């Protein structure tokens, strides 16, 4: 991982204070997503062994999804604004994990222009395509919280809003 500071000297000292917890959150998000993906695969294997048709839901799947959403919400609630959480969380799980790149090769740009708002853009390759995320982080009640999340592709200038 390479972290590039694009903030003025005045705000550069905030880089690690903001980025380190963000990257840790993304690692925890990825670990939970991977765990649920693996447990879902195991339920599918057990469903097949039991002779349950493929079009039917595996026994225990609804409970697994309830657990996933509860655990994801518990992970994100102390780190995100209610505004971002209202967009949904834990809406997907799969292989590779959405933020799995934080455990590998990527670079990030830290930007900050005022004392209560920063952004971190992550740039990575997935499925042979350059992709990016932008996290807008605000100082709320003395804590840095992720307030907005966007995704995009390296060759385009547009950002697309999304939930966690």
Image (cartoon, rainbow, N blue to C red):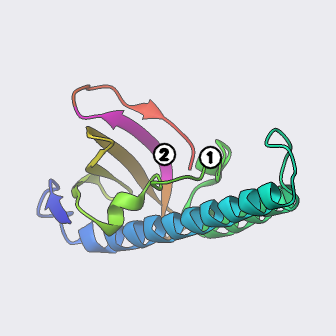
Could you tell whether 81 is left or right of 48 in the image?
left
Q: Position of residue 149 (x, y in %)?
A: 46, 45
Could you tell whether 25 is left or right of 63 in the image?
left
Q: Which mark is residue 148?
A: 2
Could you tell whether 43 is left or right of 161 in the image?
right
Taking the image as drawn, is residue 73 in sight?
no
Label 2–label 1 contact, CB within 8 A: yes
Nearest the viewer among 83 and 101 is 101
Nearest the viewer among 115 and 99 is 99
Q: Position of residue 110 (x, y in %)?
A: 23, 56
Label 2 Cα neighbours within 10 Å, binned few <14 / some 14-19 / many ≥20: many
Nearest the viewer among 14 and 35 is 35
Q: Which mark is residue 75?
A: none
**Residue drawn 61% across the image and 65% down it:** 38
Which region is colored magenta?
A: 147-154
Nearest the viewer among 112 and 66 is 66
Which residue in the structure is indicated by mark 1? Answer: 83
How many numbered circles does the render carry? 2
Q: CA distance from mark 2 to mark 1?
A: 8 Å
Taking the image as drawn, is residue 22 in sight?
yes
């Amino acid at each position: 991982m390479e972290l590039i500071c694009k903030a003025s000297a005045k705000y550069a000292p905030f880089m690690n204070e903001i980025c380190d917890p963000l990257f840790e959150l993304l690692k925890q998000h990825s670990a939970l997503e991977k765990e649920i993906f693996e447990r879902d695969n195991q339920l599918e294997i057990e469903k097949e062994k039991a002779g349950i048709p493929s079009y039917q839901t595996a026994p225990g799947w609804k409970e697994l999804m309830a657990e996933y959403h509860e655990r994801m919400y518990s992970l994100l609630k102390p780190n995100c604004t209610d505004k971002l959480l209202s967009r949904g969380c834990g809406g997907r799980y799969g292989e590779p994990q959405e933020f799995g790149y934080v455990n590998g090769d990527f670079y990030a740009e830290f930007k900050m222009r005022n004392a209560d708002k920063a952004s971190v853009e992550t740039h990575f390759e997935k499925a042979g395509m350059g992709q990016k995320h932008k996290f807008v982080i605000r100082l709320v009640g003395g804590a840095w919280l992720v307030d907005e999340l966007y995704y995009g592709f390296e060759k385009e200038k547009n950002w697309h809003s999304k939930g966690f």
